[in-house]
Amino acid sequence: MKISESIYNRVLYDYRVKKLVGDLLSRRAIYNNPLYQKLYNNLLKRKMNLYKDIPFRVMIENTNACNANCVFCPHKIMKRKVGLMTMGLYKRIIDECLRLGINFVTVYGFGEPLLDKYFTERIKYAKNSGIKRVTTNTNLMYLKKEMIPKLLESGIDEIYISFDAATKETYKKIRPGLDFKTVEGNILSLVKARNEKGLVKPEIVLSFVETDMNKNETKKYLDKWKNVVDNISISYVHNWTGDIKSNVLTKGKKDPCRLLWSDIVISWNGDVQLCCNDYENRIILGNVKKTKIDDIWGGKRLSAIRSFHEEGNFDKIGICKNCQYNYHHKSPWWVAK
């Protein structure tokens, strides 16, 4: 493992290191330091230029249907139509990624990806076509026993599992509609099946969103799972562009949001929304049924929004005005691979 990747993994997956870095980056003495500013601005320019022509990652929403009612998610107030991406459109997107040289695809959006009966078929198509890194994020409630071999054989590289409690009582409060024991059993079954086959992939990562309801369980959770799964990511609730209340303190400065330079997000119907936090698709940059991915990525609308961000004029974009995601201490450009 390269030194840079080792540092990246420590910041991303080591709970104490992550908290320390977040605290440091929220301090004026750090982000206003001339040397730090120079290094950071050089990084921004380098990354912006790197992904000028094509995005780092393509997020494909196979479905926006969901089986949960999580307290920190606005899915329950979403008004846009619920649907499933056709295989024809999905394959077209994958083929276009290959044409453009995009090597990173994640198959999920504002829904639960395993509700899609074609999920493993989609992953297999992407991997067999030559996409180097294919990932997903799931609550794993609907991982049926017969699906595990298909999932392992699909070639998927990383599975992020949203599982935010150490006890069933807390889990029930955070993720109504899901069953703690079922999900816990599914995690263990998936890890066991992978290990018995002697496979390195998929990398299995637990994702724990820390809130006032579960923060007293964080240590217990880490102790329980640290030697079972490959990594554990502890993150903090955000306000979904201002639509959800967040008690997490945000302070310091806001950066040009790295999502505008790294990710293109394609909804199940082909619409390209501004970012993954734009769950209602309030800002549509184009539709991949009509326009090529690279033309949308280099289009006038996204370019104008990026300019507002570079100038610090976040108030000019409705959904960016109150968004907490791009505070320097929450999602700095340092963490982007």
Image (cartoon, helix red, strand yellow):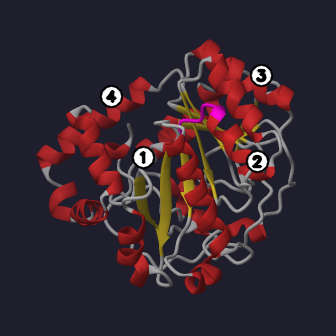
For residue 320, what is the image quadrant?
A: bottom right
Q: Nearer the viewer, mark 4 or mark 2?
A: 2
Mark 2 or 3 closer to N-term? 3
Q: Nearer the viewer, residue 228 or 247?
A: 228
Give the class, few, some or many, for how many residues have Cα within 10 Å of label 2's Cα (few <14, many ≥20): few
Residue with the mark numbered 4: 46
Residue at position x 76%, y 48% from top? 146
**Extreme top residue here?**
99
Q: Percent position (x, y) of residue 291?
A: 76, 23
Residue with the mark numbered 1: 256
Q: Amino acid at mark 3?
A: Arg
Residue 159: give its label.
Answer: none
Q: Which residues are magenta?
A: 153-158
Q: Secondary structure at mark 4?
A: helix
The chief SS type of the magenta part is loop
Q: Amino acid at mark 2?
A: Glu
Residue at position x 53%, y 29% from top? 55
Residue with the mark numbered 3: 92
- How far separated are the C-alphas under marks 1 and 4? 14 Å
Q: Nearer the viewer, mark 1 or mark 4?
A: 4
Residue 146: give its label.
Answer: 2
Q: Nearer the viewer, residue 225 or 51?
A: 225
The C terminus is located in which quarter? top left
Mark 4 or 2 closer to N-term? 4
For residue 128, what is the image quadrant?
A: top right
- How far separated are the C-alphas under marks 2 and 3? 28 Å
